[in-house]
Amino acid sequence: MTDPTPDSLVPPIPVTLLSGALGAGKTTLLRELLDARHGLKIAVIENEFAASGIDDQLLGDTPVTVVALADGCICCSIGGDLTRALVVLLERLDAGELDFERLVIECSGMADPGPIAQAFFAEEQLRDRYQLDGILTLVDAVHAERQLDRPLAQAQVGFADKLLVTKRDQVDDARLEALCARLARINRRAPIVLADHGKVPLTELIELRGFHLEGDPDALVAASLIPPTTLFTPSPTPHRHDDAISTLILESIYPLDIDALSEFMNELLEEHGNRLLRYKGVLDIEGEPRRLVFQGVFRLYGFDWDREWGSEPRKSVVVFIGEHLPEERIRQGFARATERRIG
Ligand SMILES: Nc1nc2c(ncn2[C@@H]2O[C@H](COP(=O)(O)OP(=O)(O)OP(=O)(O)O)[C@@H](O)[C@H]2O)c(=O)[nH]1
């Protein structure tokens, strides 16, 4: 072993999860990414090695097989044990046997990205050494309409920081527009980008900072024509559509009481945490010059004080993406946290 640099001095390795239904175009995108002349050393974890077509000859008997790809990238088959693969990559990196600066995990078409994302928060070593940068979900424009009737496909969309619509060349404008509208209802946080045979500018794929705690309230929501609902809208008409997974965005100009808010968040996560795929917020807390930012996946969440509001207008924005979201409950919880302050 070479002398490892202390963990605290090593910047975490950014990780991108590639998700999407079978045949959505994940491998096509991955190949384009690996072939592009960006000079990045990318490690890849495949959880469907044989199906990936990257190189079927590389399958080994050990649970984790790490192989060299073109351009100095490496590929790692995981035999189902993601945590083990992540640890082995670190061990080999620290030992100087491998060299990479980013990691891409291609999830199987049947995988729910939620538990995969959770692996990066659950274990201390993984939390310290890796930083989940973003979840990219590929959506097959030809088959999405039917695929999205299944909960798994909706969850893959719901978890995404960005949605990449593939096979645009196979559908007309009307169909594409209808699909994008549906995707935006399920996940209003994720920008939608078209991927033509896997060709997407690198800037759309990396540095998404989807799991970072950052405090720009307006940046929480993808450019969307649907306005957020203010916290004080009384009994709004529930948004009706057939998809089980949807987005709720709340916005308020009234500061929140931190005690009431944390009480409410604890209750919400206790009662409904397993249905909350992704949630993020930038909050204006009464009496506090800094913004409070939080983000989470299911019951795992983090929060932090971010920069001061300064001269920027103070406001709170929260975004919840979940299955059968308890919209009224969330709305009331946040409204109560402002009422308590008002007295
Ligand atoms: N027409 C068209 N075909 C595409 C596009 N992107 C990918 N494909 C094709 O779609 C098929 C499936 O693509 P893959 O990249 O293998 O999809 P995948 O998501 O990795 O598939 P699994 O590993 O089975 O989940 C291939 O034949 C690709 O060439 C696109 O933008 N347009």
Image (cartoon, grey):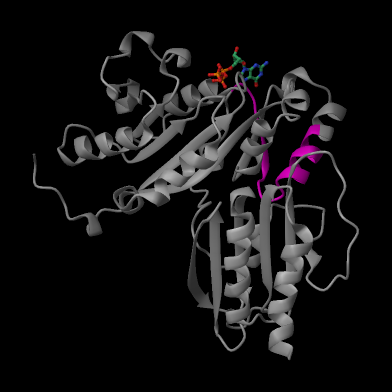
Q: Horizontally, is 320 left or right of 43 in the view? A: right
Residue segment shown in magenta: 179-197
Residue at the image point whose x is 20% and y is 35% from the top: 92
State whether residue 191 is above or below residue 33.
below
Q: Quadrant of the C terminus?
A: bottom right
Pick whichever, 306 or 73, lies toward us.
Answer: 306
Q: Quadrant of residue 204?
A: top right
Q: Is residue 37 above or below residue 283?
A: above
Q: What residue is at 59 percent from the left and 74 percent from the top?
A: 263
Q: Position of residue 10 (x, y in %)?
A: 25, 53
Q: Is residue 268 above or below residue 223?
A: below
Q: Quadrant of the N terminus?
A: top left
How far from the left and from the top, in percent, is residue 170? Answer: 75, 17
Viewer-nearest residue: 195 or 161: 161
Quick check: is 191 in the magenta stretch? yes
Q: Percent position (x, y) of residue 85?
A: 31, 32
Magenta region includes residue 64: no
